[in-house]
Amino acid sequence: MTLAAVPLEVFTELARTRPLPEATAALRAALHARRMLLVKSLLVRFEQRRALLAPEVGRRFEQDWALLERAERSDPAAVRDVVDYPMIGAWLTETLAAPEGPAFERHLAYLGGVAVAAAVRAGCQVGGTLTQPSGSLVLPGLGVLHCPSGSARLSGRGGLLRITDGAGGSEVILPRPTARGEPGTRRPVGSERGWSALRTLPGSTVVLDDLDPYRVPRRGIGPAALPAADRPHSDHRPWARRWHEAHTLLSATDPGRAAETSAVLRAVVPLVSPVGGAGIPMSATLRSSPGAVLTQLPADASELAESLVHESHHTKLAALHEFVPLYRPGGGTLHRVAWRLDPRPVPAVLQGAYAHLALTDLWWRARTGPVTPDAWRRKATQQFETYREQVGEALSILLESDELTFAGREFVQEMSRHHASLGVATRNPG
Amino acid sequence: MGEQRNRAADPGRDTGRTVALPDLTDVDLRTLRAMDDPGLIAAVDQVLKSSREFGQVWYVGGEGGQRTFPVTGALEGEEGQG
């Protein structure tokens, strides 16, 4: 997509960080196009290396791909939803970067779970056996079946898919979701054994993903190399409570922002929280899996609301940049910004400025909104001026940069206009 | 959606090389596998050459961290360029 293909209203509202359903739809389309490019890249790499793969690996890949295609013929929208799940982006990225040999072959095996998840979502007839040397069958966005025998038997028709460990030690029967937009089957039919289901967060289709092996990079997040939190250390109840409270807060402050957050995000990934840890929770977005917020459990709803807005804007900007390049690669100039000690390249300055502009906008509305809670309003009043000043400094850097594309300059100029409008007492920022 | 252009290695150009990437938004998986459009193959080549670039992480906060730092502090930005 070129800049000319993006309606002016969409481009402008994206630059202003403001929620707009048309913009969310455009970003989702862009993310899907990008995801399809990565899938094609995997297919090309598979074909290029096919002769070097173990024969059973090649056969298995073809079997999984055939199921994926068949599921798509049954329900294209459902399979598109599976393919676009954030962690599949991380899987594709890791697989494409994997060295030749066993590592590449191990990553390819994840496609089996992708295909089975697609079959569940599409409700298509399926049978046969899947080898699972890892001992677990991961269905992205749905859950994980423990397969101690190293294989899983599949049988399904009429919208029900039974998956059984090869030795019968575990089993689950998954129904096809009944409504479009419902992310998956959280409630298996009958009693399940060895099945761990992902759970949705209240009032949304966003899942708390504490299972997928690709949800956090192996090196962890940040200087402390924070790993993913696994069950039982990722108790759903406090996350569900915080999510509900955070959305109540966002809805009271800016209903459009609350709706956008639920539309842009597909998953929240819990990170390990050290006992007695201080400071704000670590949160992150992976370029490879936009739509997933990685975060420690925040202390309260306001911290989670802040993280959701901050991280969802990394996703929005990353998606936009994938199809309308905002900066040129290879620029080496480094700049100081208020939110980091070490100097940052222009792409990082832009990402930081964008996420912080969204928070500046949020604080503006929180401190002036008629129905926001007192504590939230007080926090907003404290934060607004600091954020506004620091984002202004970063925008000045960007406006003087020669590393932005034409579209990037237009984007930053609109960000600056919106920034200037915030804090003008007599004007509603819109 | 219109066309998508591959980003350039040439820093002097805005939108990159001139081979257009076909719109993949509404392409089905079977068709995708069979496609050999030059623009798509060029884009795939670029992805395969730069796949590590997509390991970037934007993060904020952590032990003792805060989102903005009037004088000193840390932890907002990206890591893992490769």
Image (cartoon, rainbow, N blue to C red):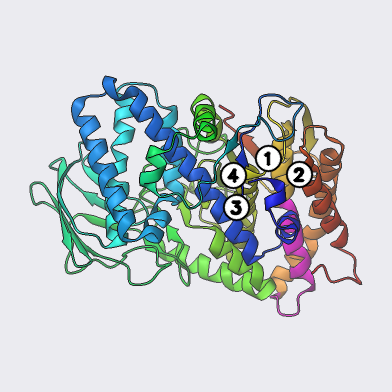
Q: Secondary structure at mark 3?
A: loop
Label 1 neighbour load within 10 Å: few <14, some 14-19, many 20+:
many
Above or below — where is A251 with respect to A16? below
**Badge nearest the viewer, 4 or 2:** 2
Q: Residue at x 16, y 40 (%)?
A: A150
Q: Secondary structure at mark 4?
A: loop
C-alpha separation, residue under disc 4 versus residue under disc 2:
34 Å
Q: Residue at x 86, y 42 (%)?
A: A396
Horizontal arrangement in the rendering, residue A282 relative to residue A391 (left or right): left
Q: Residue furthest left?
A: A167
Quarter of the image where one finds residue B34: top left
Q: Residue at x 41, y 42 (%)?
A: B32
Mark carried by residue B1: 3
- Mark 1 and mark 2 in contact? Answer it, CB < 8 Å: yes
Horizontal arrangement in the rendering, residue A242 relative to residue A7 (left or right): left
Quarter of the image where one finds residue A364: bottom right
Q: Secondary structure at mark 2?
A: helix
Q: Is residue B38 visible?
A: yes
